[in-house]
Amino acid sequence: MRLFKGKASGPSPQSSNVVAPGGNVPLAPPNASIPQTPNSSVPPKAKKAGRLSRFKEFFRNLSRKKKLAFIGVVAIILLGGSAAAYYVITNNNPKKVLVQGVENTLGQTQIHFEGKVSTIPVSGDSDFNSDTTIKGQADTAAKSLQAEVGVTISGVSVSTEVIFVDGTLYIKIGDLSEVVSFVKLNDPDLGKAIEASADKIANQWIEVDNTLIRQYSSGSDCQTSPTGLTFTADDISKIIDQYKDSPFVTITSTSDDMVNGNAATKFELDIDHARGLSYLRNLNVGPLKKISECEDSFDTSNITGSTPLTVWIDQQNRQIVKVAAHGTEENQNVSGEINFSYSPVSITKPEGAKSLVELLGSLSESTDSGITPFFPLLNGLDSSSI
């Protein structure tokens, strides 16, 4: 008996597709191979070859004029880049930067400076120590100088201001109370004599004429003001050229640093004493023409060794902006540094200055012996010749 109407059928043929349960998406037969997605990556060599072929095609399609123009542009880029790199390397060579720094500094005529020198004993055998500060300005073209100097020696301080203008030296010594007290402790009689004169000297401008300096120095030009303080372009060129023939400075290291908020190159140098002195002896340039004459006034035969020196050169203007040194001298550790800046200066003759001869006369009246305690070396000067 048939339960269903219709044609009798034999075994159902095997379907070629298998449908996922509950879905209409046919699944691949179990034995069917799954097609692979083509690999889109290209070997690097193939990529490079492709770019090269495209560049060749591009260059081949250019006209002759365009080819020449293209080659010219490439050449300019390559040569320009090479020149720029060469300029950076050669102009930042430490020796060249140092020479340029010295050269540019020598060409400055208006300078501001501020520094300090300190000494402390090497061992505990001495309690001597000192600090010296200096701050001032100079106009080398006008041969003028103004400086404030403060000295503290073993706790005793005194300040001095110096002005050199129009061929005349002016000196003003500050408060002398500490000096008087110190002298009284060691020599009461001398302390009493100094105390009688201190009020006439302290904070009083003293005028020292150039003729008086010449008389005191026995007519030697070595201790008087030089005929000129500026360096011409020719002077600077000779200074640099002679140094190239007789070098006495060794650059031991360089580094980047900051001075007064500006980028600078720090040079650690070693100065050979004998070679440096030989260089100065043979240097016959500008204000340095009389170095040999002045050098003969003291013994230099035993000068040997070297001194470390640190120099900072501004990276933008290539000028010396700071110098520092340290060493040992007569059982004392000595260290010092000085900063430089370059801008207009103003130096004028002080008001109310008294001549040294006039001051010596008034001081002689205030002492029983007629000896001026503060200027013993100037006693006996023939004031009539001034």
Image (spheres, helix red, strand yellow):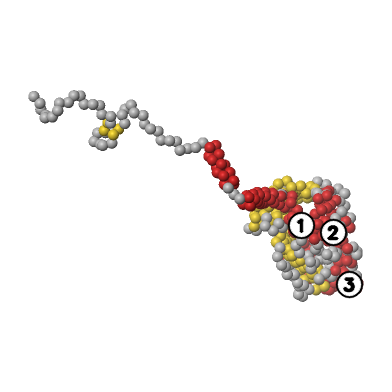
Instruction: List x then y, in percent, for residue 39.
Output: 45, 36
Q: Nearer the viewer, mark 2 or mark 3?
A: 2
Instruction: List x then y, in percent, for residue 197.
Output: 79, 69
Q: Nearer the viewer, mark 1 or mark 3?
A: 1
Instruction: List x then y, in percent, for residue 133.
Output: 72, 60
Q: Nearer the viewer, residue 335 or 248?
A: 248
Q: Nearer the viewer, residue 254 or 95?
A: 95
- Mark 1–mark 3 Cα distance, whole angstroms, equals 41 Å
Q: Provide the residue designation for mark 2.
A: 285
Residue 32 visible in the displayed image = yes
Q: Quadrant of the N terminus?
A: top left
* Residue at 87% across, 59% down: 290
* Residue at 57% across, 42% down: 52
Question: Which picture quadrant has residue 130?
Answer: bottom right
Secondary structure beneath label 1: helix
Secondary structure beneath label 2: loop
Residue farthest to the left? 1
Circle nearer the N terminus (2, 3): 2
As shown in the figure, which amino acid type bears the numbered disc 3?
Answer: Ile
Instruction: List x then y, in percent, for residue 68.
Output: 65, 50
Q: Tell me, for residue 386, which label it has, or none.
A: 3
Q: Provide the residue designation for mark 1.
A: 103
